[in-house]
Amino acid sequence: MVEDNYETRKEDLMNKRTGTFILTALSLAGLGTAGCERKPQQRASDASKSTDGLAPVLPENLFVQEAPAGARDVTDVKADKSATAEVVVHGRIGGRKEPFVDGAAMFMLADVNMRPCNELHGDRCPTPWDYCCEPRESLVAKVATIQVIGADGRPLRINLKGKHGLEPLAELTVAGEVAQRDEHGTLVINAREIHVNTNRG
């Protein structure tokens, strides 16, 4: 009984943390200049254990060598209200100080045309991928949340940071299905294929 209660509490905590990330990422609450003033927070990158004690496994064909065709910028996909099913989006990982969520296969993708603060000013901002120099209203229109889901329809319990070159400011093309979008700027995409551009100049 004690073990059952523990697993239930752990499940509730995981769901709460994932939900909090989505709300924070999509509303961009609390963004400002703080990211340029503080050192990046260290996060654990180990995979979260599932309830059966096994680490989750990413889909075998998730990372692809060739970029999916027909990619559009994040801003274009967000502005296109007809984009409610299959989409291909191109962007860079970023949009907040910690664009990954610890314990869930989720990250934020920013429009590739949006330049991080260090490129704009040549400053030494320790977290330029948070785009803290971008006006909040503009940033909301230029970021989306990417997630990799399991058979249960929920994000896999694994931190994607460091996997196959997934790092802040990495340039990606993601093909997948729109899981959620609304008039408040929410755009969540279930990734089916991810191509990491390793030939950036």
Image: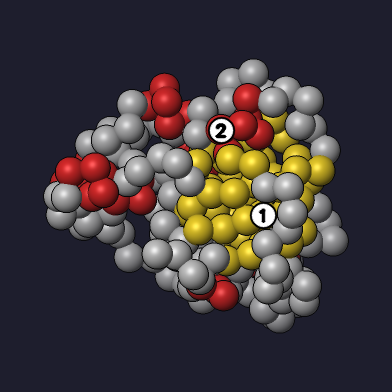
Identify the residue under disc 2.
Answer: 75
The amino acid pointed to by label 2 is Thr
The amino acid pointed to by label 1 is Val
Residue 80 place in picture, x, y as percent: 69, 26
Say which quadrant the C terminus sits in: bottom left
Q: Nearer the viewer, residue 108 or 115?
A: 115
Residue 144 seen in this snapshot: yes
Q: Answer whether labels 2 and 1 touch (C-beta < 8 Å).
A: no
Identify the residue under disc 1.
Answer: 174
Please name the residue shown 78% across and 73% down the image: 61
Tell me if mark 2 has few (under 14), some (14-19) or many (20+) residues whose alpha carbon lies within 10 angstroms of its own.
Answer: many
Residue 35 seen in this snapshot: no
Residue 141 place in picture, x, y as percent: 51, 28
Please name the residue shown 22% across and 56% down the image: 126
- Which is more N-terminal, label 1 or label 2? 2
Say which quadrant the N terminus sits in: bottom right
- In this picture, is 158 found above or below 135? below
